[in-house]
Image: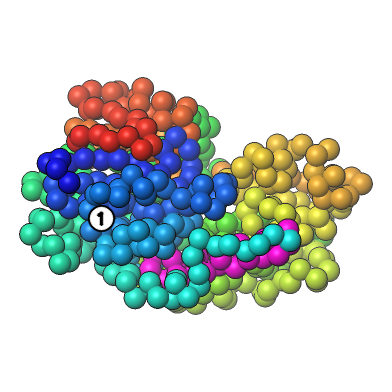
Amino acid sequence: MSERVRLKYCPVGAVSEIGASAHYLQFDRWGVLLDAGLDPHHALQDGVPAYDLLYDRPVNAILITHAHLDHIGSLPVALQRFPRARVYMTPATAELTEVMLHHYLHVQRKQAMERWQPYRPLYSEEYLDMIRYLFQSFDYEAPFWLHGYEESGLRFTFYDAGHILGSAGVLIEWRGRRLFYTGNVRLSAQFILKGARLPDSVDVLITEATYGADAEAETIRRSAEVKRFARHLSERLRMGGVVLLPVFALGRTQEMLMLLHRLRQKNQIPAVPIYVAGFGLAINRLYDRMLHKIYPEYHRGQLRTITFGRWSRGRHLRGPAILISTSGMLLPGSASFDFARQLAEDARNAIFFVGYADPETPGGLLREKKFEALKELFQVDRLECGVEVFRFSAHAHRRELLKLIKRLQPSQIILTHGEKPALQWMAEHIPDVLPDGQVLIPESGTWYDL
């Protein structure tokens, strides 16, 4: 490579959407990839970041911020392209990544069979087993060098991002410069996880902007939302209904279990059975095994004691009961979709949404109460169950992101992981808290000097 560079940046994945996160940084003769996500909304190869852009660039390290598919889904593909790269993540993320990638292949195989389509995965289970030994894990706030390339001067530190178990922001120090990548970040505490921890001031900040266009998110007080949730939940349970919480298996399942446990302890909801169905059960076991290593006060095995049992799809739904099930968007073929169909015609039942749902999915249609479209989809004559939406996000809202930016005082801010209105709102309001900061909304596949 004839070009001599010092610090270059290229987003090889998604920027102006919530998709395949992947950011490349070149520090002179050394290269670092931040996250290796996959966009599940696209056909397999179309959802992979544009790794071809790096064909003549060094990739010495891949740093993973957390184990959601849009941040780890193409990691095996990246390792096929860059077989000499070191792979760094936190210990919990290493455990979760292995489980999540195997589950992704299981889902892909199942969907191919249901659609009578050939199963052609991006990578095999055997390959996942082969690459697991490459994952090197480091605890929060424990700096480490780029192994094998110490002469690069690159030093990394993970900081608790407060998003899901093991999630991390990444501080990169190089020749007196400090760059921080937030990954997905939550500054205030959730029901299990504490809020994010941050480094001191940095020179360059790459930050998510997921809720940049959401004016309502910054007005939600968690205590008031919890009371509203408890009130509506109690009403349905006292009627003898079943309340379904469609959730993401990783993160939202565990947070909602802890909330329900606390409400039940305080007698704010009736003491009814709490069931879990779907992939969230496997993630619960990892939380129970690993969370106390991060938060020593967490009682090992606590999530197991909260749940009454596992609810299989063939079982008759009888209330009063609470059912937590994947998928969070009620995708056809999922456990939560089947349960929602069973609950739909009984006015005593309810479906409570406690996380994001794409507007085009059944979950998104139900959130918007587009019942006519759903009756055909669910194959029911009427839709009588209650539907409620609650705001329990694992992301920082836009005012919190502005506080983060003000605290870190970067000279340059790069906005990613948000729809275009979200990115634009952040860009317009960053000067309010950091007048001299240079703001960049990058274009995917474009190279920038930092």
Give the x, y percent position of residue 338: 77, 59
Residue at the image position 48 percent from the left and 42 percent from the top:
18
Q: Which residues are magenta?
A: 93-115
- Secondary structure found at label 1: loop
The magenta stretch spans residue 63:
no
Locate residue 176 relative to residue 58 in the image: left or right: left
Which residue occupies the foreground of this view, 203 or 133?
A: 133
At 7% across and 59% down in the image, what residue appears?
A: 151
The image position of residue 100, as x and y in percent, is 50, 65
Q: Residue at x 77, y 55 (%)?
A: 340
Residue 101, magenta (yes or no) = yes
Q: Is 102 in front, or is 143?
A: 102
Amino acid tagged 1: Val
What secondary structure is the magenta-colored segment mainly? helix
Q: Is residue 350 above or below residue 98?
A: above
**Horizontal side, residue 442 vs residue 216: left or right:** left
Please, is residue 234 above or below residue 254 in the view?
Answer: above
Mark 1 = which residue?
59
Foreground residue among 194 and 441: 441
Residue 85: image quadrant is bottom left
Residue at x 38% of width, y 72% of height:
131
In which quadrant will I find the C terminus? top left
**Mark 1 crowdedness (10 Å alpha carbons): few <14, some 14-19, many ≥20:** many
Q: Residue 379: where, in percent of width, then height?
A: 87, 50
Q: Could you tell me if residue 130 is visible in this image?
A: yes
